[in-house]
Amino acid sequence: MATSSTISRVQVQEFLANKPPFNLLSENALKTQLVGKCQLLGYRTGQPLFEREKMPTQVAIIYQGQARVLGYDQRSQRHVSLQLAGPGEILGWAGLLRGMPCETALASTDLIAVTLPAADFLAILEAEPEFGEVFLECPAVSEIFELLSQEFARRAEVSSNLKELSNNVAENTVVINLPKGDKKPKN
């Protein structure tokens, strides 16, 4: 496995340029706003990239290796494996955008991730609207699982397969973002 010291910024840029949604970025944004501000981090098998109880301070794009995305089932009080994420997949973004941590991800193999500080990621979303829409309009399976788990625990519903339901819902869901602030209905 290559180490982060043997991977150049040019290789990272080439890797991301062909992967959705990074292929929506202008060449300048990709080079200066993303690759220019990123850092390569290595994770050992079993090491957490993100924990559901902690707000992400960065996003991680898997460059090499795999990570297991976990959801926490409120009913059983256990983590459930939701998906295996591989090269090109982005982790940590949902908590940043929604302002609430919701993702646990563990390296399931030795892993190298391209990491970008939260503030820089949010700045790219604002500067590149087409790129930003990808994240603003689509939910992460971990946040769907979190919401369904809370609702089913509230209802004392125990028979449903939340993993399967979350994956089915994720495919057909569009997120609607409301403006921030205290909005009162007009009379």
Image (cartoon, grey):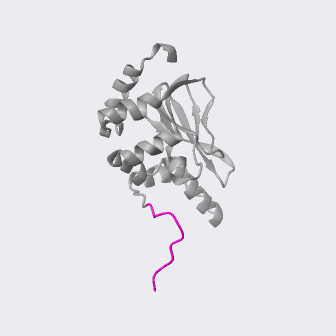
In the depicted view, which residue is nearer to us: 134 or 158?
Answer: 134
Q: How many marks?
A: 0
Q: Examine the rendering and report whether any part of residue 24 can be seen.
A: yes
Q: Examine the rendering and report whether any part of residue 1 can be seen.
A: no
Q: Quadrant of residue 176?
A: bottom left
Q: Is residue 139 found left or right of 47 in the rendered image?
A: left
Q: Eyeballing the image, is 88 above or below 150?
A: above
Boundaries of the magenta span:
177-187
Q: Eyeballing the image, is 147 above or below 47?
A: below
In the rendered image, the residue lying farthest to the right is 77
In the depicted view, which residue is nearer to us: 153 or 91?
Answer: 91
Residue 41 x/y as whole percent: 55, 25
Q: Is residue 25 found left or right of 76 in the rendered image?
A: left
Q: Is residue 97 found left or right of 158 in the rendered image?
A: left
Picture residue at 47% right of the left edge, 45% below the top? 122
Q: Eyeballing the image, is 66 above or below 146?
A: above
Residue 78 x/y as whole percent: 67, 46
Does the magenta run of residues contain 72? no
Picture residue at 51% right of the left edge, 48% below the top? 94
In the rendered image, the residue lying farthest to the bottom is 187
Picture residue at 46% right of the left edge, 37% below the top? 90
In the depicted view, which residue is nearer to us: 129 or 19?
Answer: 129
Picture residue at 46% right of the left edge, 86% below the top? 187
Residue 62 x/y as whole percent: 47, 30
Residue 169 x/y as whole percent: 44, 55
